[in-house]
Image (cartoon, helix red, strand yellow):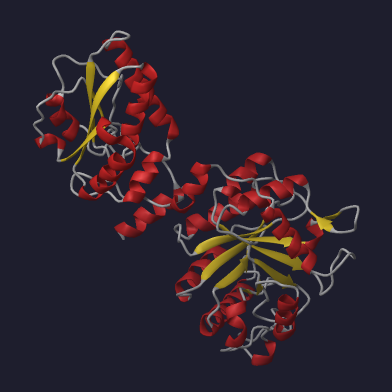
Amino acid sequence: MSPTVGLEILCNEDADELMQYSQMYGFSFMVPQILKFGSIALDDASYPPASLVYDKLVLNGPEHASFSIGSIAPWMDVESSDLMAVSHCQTIIRQQVQWASHIGLSGVIFYCPTTGPMINFSRCLNEAIGMLNYSQVFIRIPIFISGDDNEGWTRWNTARILGRHNVKLVVALEIGHELPSPEVLEKWLAEPIRLAILPTNAFITNKGGFPVLSKRHQSFIQKLMETDCKFVISSPSNDSLHKAGTLSLYREYIEFLNRNLPAGDVINQFSAGYHDYLQAPLQPLMENLESATYEVFEKDPIKYQQYEMAVYRALIDRVPENSDIISTIMVVGAGRGPLVDRSLKAAADAGRKVKLYAVEKNANAVVGLRARKAAVWGDAVTVVHIDMRYWNPEDKADILVSELLGSFGDNELSPECLDGAQRLIKGKYTTSLKLYLDLFGSCWFKCIFILISLKMC
């Protein structure tokens, strides 16, 4: 999937022309300022106008809104020591936010001050969040502020805390030619970076005269591509800094990096849609699990390898070689049958004879088990559709196999069902499980914290 790349031309205050350039060069959106540069004098002693003037707006109508993320005028200094100037700026910012809401912008960008205490700036952000019902609020922060690797992140964190971790408050990270330490870059990757802004002077020129990024930049950008991040090429003019071509070269290079992303492993590909979401605990005793849930279990190859080895060793220990003894194996909570497959393979590798029961209460899962029996297992497996707690078989199990031990933060059906299934085992028995511990511990995870906070409000 190609990345979404937008265009910002800092000197261009004509929305129609900027849209024309963006579309001509293949960009997906544009990032204009809402207000023309210096259109309202900050040293004017008179109170700011009650409404903005049409000819002082860059984004002067809803016809550009669907293709734009608008920027609040960057010369608004709300951290000034001049209280009159601060009041003046706050009023103009409020008017820009109201205009952005009126024309339906999907996002509004605030330039984060690189000096000062951030108190008034955060107050403006919080007010904007309350006024923008359907828009995200971006804080535009340089990734590297001279003299301190961590200053940019610290300023973002201050704004986030003062904004009470509002989910509408996200990062527009400006990635210049200088990057902070690897540790700070890792810290940034944990943040909600929804825009990565790349000034054209962050690119270097290769032997062919084309714009490219350094190896460190490439690595960081490709990691951002694995998240929900859009990219913006920020140019000081309508022309490319690199003479080999037009502004479209920068977009093409970002797309090139995306095409050359390292292939993710099976687990990462499968779990891509589950990141940063609070998962509801499974309740298979009360509800029948879906096939997709069983598939999630089966993506853990190590677990099933260990189960297979445990069954193999149990068979080797209890039955002499070349013996005609038939061991009874019961797989309780068979699901779609992965433990049945592993138990049969363990028996074949051990050279021992077995009689295997697949016990499952989920009527939908039983359909699949019976299909596997007809197509693969044959008479080696007996499928039993019943709750294991109520099953009274004629035979008792020599080996009882179950994966109903749950996982991190979820003990699933154990010990309720497994305790009720112990009566199915012959006499004395051993277990491959050496330690089973229910543990509940505290942890800090921003996304989960926000979700829980919203539900508690």
Q: Quadrant of residue 23?
A: bottom right
Q: Nearer the viewer, residue 231 or 449?
A: 231
Q: Which residue in the rendered view is the most extreme toward the bottom?
A: 54
Q: Position of residue 382 (x, y in %)?
A: 21, 34
Query: Can see residue 92?
Result: no
166 lies above or below 63: above
| Percent coordinates x, y for residue 59 in the rendering | 64, 83
Seen in the image, is 1 located left or right of residue 169? Answer: right
Question: Between residues 320 and 18, which one lies in front from this camera angle?
Answer: 320
Nearest the camera: 393 or 289? Answer: 393
Foreground residue among 345 and 224: 345
Residue at 87% x, 63% y: name it: 242
Relative to 452, say whether 318 is above or below: above
Looking at this rendering, what residue extends furthest in the top direction?
Answer: 320
Q: Where, quadrant-wise, is the C terminus in this rendering?
A: bottom left
Q: Residue at x 40, y 50 (%)?
A: 448
Q: Quadrant of residue 18?
A: bottom right
Q: Residue at x 9, y 36 (%)?
A: 390
> What residue do we see at 29% from left, 8% from top?
320
Is residue 329 at least partly visible in the picture? yes
Residue 41's spot in the image, x, y percent? 71, 82
Count of marks overlaid on the render: 0
From this view, report whether residue 353 is shown above or below residue 381: above
Residue 103 is situated, as x and y percent measured from the top left of the image, at 55, 84
Give the quadrant of the N terminus: bottom right
